[in-house]
Amino acid sequence: MKIDKVKNYNQKLLAVLGTIGAIFLVVALIAFISIVIQEHRRSSYNAPETGILSDEKIEKLQKENKREQVISYETPKLIDTLNSIYIIPVSHKTLNEKENINGLLNAYSYSEEFYEKPDSRYSDGFYGAFNNIIIFNPNNGNNKKLFERRVNFNDIKTEYFGKEILLLIKASEKDTYKDGVINLKDFKSLYIYSFSQKKMQKVGIDGMDVYNYKFINNSQDLIIGFGIDKNDDGQYEEYNEPTLIKKYDFESGQLTDIIDKKTSSDLQKTLEGTQK
């Protein structure tokens, strides 16, 4: 009898352990699938966008009377609530196959999404794959494109200074990396559009990349970090190539050094050990 009781106890124990083990495996499997999905989404989000085609590719396509990319309009974003001024980011789509340039281009039509809820009207930036921006005034129907040149950018920042509103965009306009597309790998300049002045300013240094920027406290002037392409491959690599910083005067449009040449030279000599 005791042996039978022990056997029954062992069987129940094994059944319970087996059930717990099965539940654990199911939970582990669900967790694993969830992690895989999250990593896939993260990698998809961080993947470099394709950019716009280089001038060389465009010239080749034009000879064939073909195109591979078409414009696409994003939902308008309310920027100036007082004057009801919107921006309409212009993105681009790469077609699966080339099409004739004279073919129809599907038009964008406004929808209910045009009218944004008050709590989403003010944002510090918009992220996507863009090649232009339309300034749109629904009161009079006027619209204006900001860029006359072919450019590519992925981020639109907005800054509010009392009655002044600025748009800030780091955009590439040349295939400096020579990979056939104009994208985020190429050197970028900083474009600043003033709503009060209705004017665009371009800030850049030939052969360098606008890596980052920051407004000086209580000022419209900026500190801008420029990436130096040490190996001359047309791309700034932040992990092994240096940056320099300059001050940009918003009113005059002038770039000036923040760190003087002597201090920079002394710092370098101290680092490399030639000055002790």
Image (tube, rainbow, N blue to C red):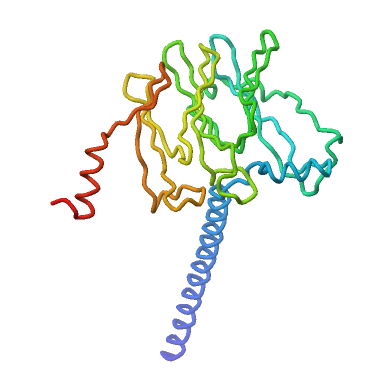
Q: Residue furthest left?
A: 276
32, 52: nearer the viewer:
52
Residue at 43% over, 21% down: 253
| Most foreground residue, 276 or 98 | 276
Q: Quadrant of residue 53?
A: top right
Q: Nearer the viewer, residue 248 or 109?
A: 248
Q: Residue at x 46, y 87 (%)?
A: 7
Q: Position of residue 150 (x, y in %)?
A: 64, 33
Place residue 111 in its image quadrant: top right
Q: Return the x and y of residue 97 as percentages of the image width and height.
A: 80, 49
Counting labels gives 0
Q: Relative to residue 139, is residue 203 depicted above or below?
A: below
In the image, residue 235 above or below residue 70: below
The part of the image, by quadrant, that contains residue 58 is: top right
Residue, x 70% and y 12% (percent of image)?
Answer: 141
Viewer-side residue, 117 vs 65: 65
Q: 3 left or right of 172?
A: left
Quarter the N terminus occupies: bottom left
